[in-house]
Image: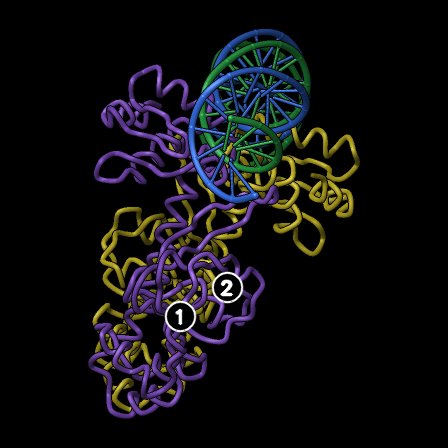
Chain colours: A yellow, B purple, C green, D blue
Amino acid sequence: MARIPRKGEQAMPELEALGIFRNLGEESRRLLRRGVACKDCQPGLPILHKGTPISGAYFVVGGRLRVYALAPDGTEATLYYIDPGETCVFALNSLFNDLRYPAWVQAEGPTTVALIPGPLFRELFRREPSIQDVTVRALSTLVFRLMAELEEVHAYKLDQRLANLLLLRASGEGEIAMTQQQMAAHLGTTREVVARLMREFVASGAVETRRGRVLVRDAAALEARLATC
Amino acid sequence: MARIPRKGEQAMPELEALGIFRNLGEESRRLLRRGVACKDCQPGLPILHKGTPISGAYFVVGGRLRVYALAPDGTEATLYYIDPGETCVFALNSLFNDLRYPAWVQAEGPTTVALIPGPLFRELFRREPSIQDVTVRALSTLVFRLMAELEEVHAYKLDQRLANLLLLRASGEGEIAMTQQQMAAHLGTTREVVARLMREFVASGAVETRRGRVLVRDAAALEARLATC
DNA sequence: CCGGCTCTGTAGCTTTTGCTACAGATCGTC
DNA sequence: GACGATCTGTAGCAAAAGCTACAGAGCCGG
């Protein structure tokens, strides 16, 4: 049940529930009370589109956002999720560099998002260590991830990269809720190649395939696949 | 002719020649005078190795640093250059996240580097807008680059990526001072593949090859190659 | 000048991945 | 239950890239 958007003073309690906004200076709080807005997002509808100009910083207060890219053939690849207390690093990057947003964002389930307008966020960044920390950490984390992904593309073959993806995405019970097409989009290849590689994993007993899901049956076998040069 | 390393007060004139350090507050200057060091680097010898713990931020005062990766077969791939007034963003990333340095760095020609110890840099970061700006901009620029490279790997074939590399690296006179092996390392492929593709470019009149160099003869032909799907 | 090292060019074969096509299974809606 | 959409599995062929091998050219130092 979506509430009406909350602006200024009414949005503060939600924001202060996040640790990074709890110990701000009085001046920063005053600025925030005049500029921040919180709103509930409908699951499924894009909140941000590729090419959107970015006017502020987005923080997840509750729920979860999914950031995804669209491949030329229309398929979606999830880039990353944003959990409560986290900010959208692509939006930060766009904000600090006057770039347009490079992907799409949608809410997964009921999600509350705080939007801090650009000039306000920059001012907070100037004066508040916790904001500086979250900004640099978000950018650094993204740098780390992108470097790892680029290295993986150069260093590994597709079977190894698929094995890695399965290991990384497996839940506690060893389940990956992805279609082959989604895996293909993530790895930058075709669905048929994923199917072919998956057949080998099935034959070796490493996984079982279901419609829309994969079950890891022998993680060690996947790790062994990863270790082959 | 390398001078002895300059510490504290003696290093300040060189540092203040860089715009970002020119308008610092008095307290920041006082801190800097007690902590900064400048030194001249020998061309060729690595300044930083992969795996090195990072103790501070590196700014180029004069000359130029080259950051490079080593492939498993020992070949070097230049990742980026650092010019005067710029900082080593990998070192920043390592510093803020307690990571080890991910590559190698060497000086190209006579180069002077200022090292600002970690705690001092963090303090400057907290209070000085120009330091905040250079930090966020360096990280953001790296994010942008890595994202573009990752997208290029997925969206283009090797011939297109080679054409792009030649266009990007060509000097004003259309010369690229790289061996085929270096191009291969950069693109994550083999020297023979580069040779094969280069033969096609030569046959079409787009380039001429020399030992250790490539001469672009028809940039439009390379661009046309880039545009083919 | 000579020798060693590195770079370039080439060939042939193999492996990996992509493309096209098809059929069957599964799921949700009417 | 029927139907349409989507997902999975498979096959065959093509294209791209990798691997191995070799020869010749160019550069530098002794």
- Callout 1: SS: strand
Residue in the foreground of this view, choosing between B76 and B162: B76
Q: Give the amino acid at mark 1.
A: Tyr
Relative depth, front residue between B109 and D2? B109
Residue in view at x 75 percent, y 47 percent: A219
**Residue C8 appears at what percent x and percent y?**
45, 25
- State the image quarter where residue A24 is shown: bottom left
Q: Where does residue D19 sit, x and y in percent of width and height?
A: 65, 27
Dot 2 and dot 1 residues touching (CB under 8 Å)? yes
Labelled disc at residue B29:
none
Mark 1 neighbour class, 10 Å CA radius: few under 14, some 14 to 19, many 20 or more = many
Q: Amino acid at mark 2?
A: Leu
Residue A50 x %, y %? 30, 46
* Quadrant of the frame with the C terminus of chain A: top right
Q: Which residue is mark 2?
A: B48
Residue at image x 77%, y 42%? A221
Task: Give whichever of A164, B145 is nearer the camera.
Answer: B145
- Badge 2 marks a residue whose secondary structure is strand
Report crowding for label 2: few under 14, some 14 to 19, many 20 or more residues within 10 A (C-alpha). Answer: some
Q: Is residue B228 above or below residue A88?
A: above
The picture places residue A99, in percent across and down from the top left corner, at: 25, 54
Disc 1: which chain?
Answer: B
Whether residue A7 can be seen here: no
Is residue B160 visible in the rendered image? The answer is yes
In the displayed structure, does residue B8 sit left or right of residue A98? right
Q: Of the two numbered discs 2 and 1 on the same chain, state the one appearing first in sequence.
A: 2
Residue under numbered circle 1: B58
Give the answer, above or below, for where A134 lies relative to A50. below
Q: Chain of mark 2?
A: B
Which of the pair B143/A25 is nearer the observer? B143
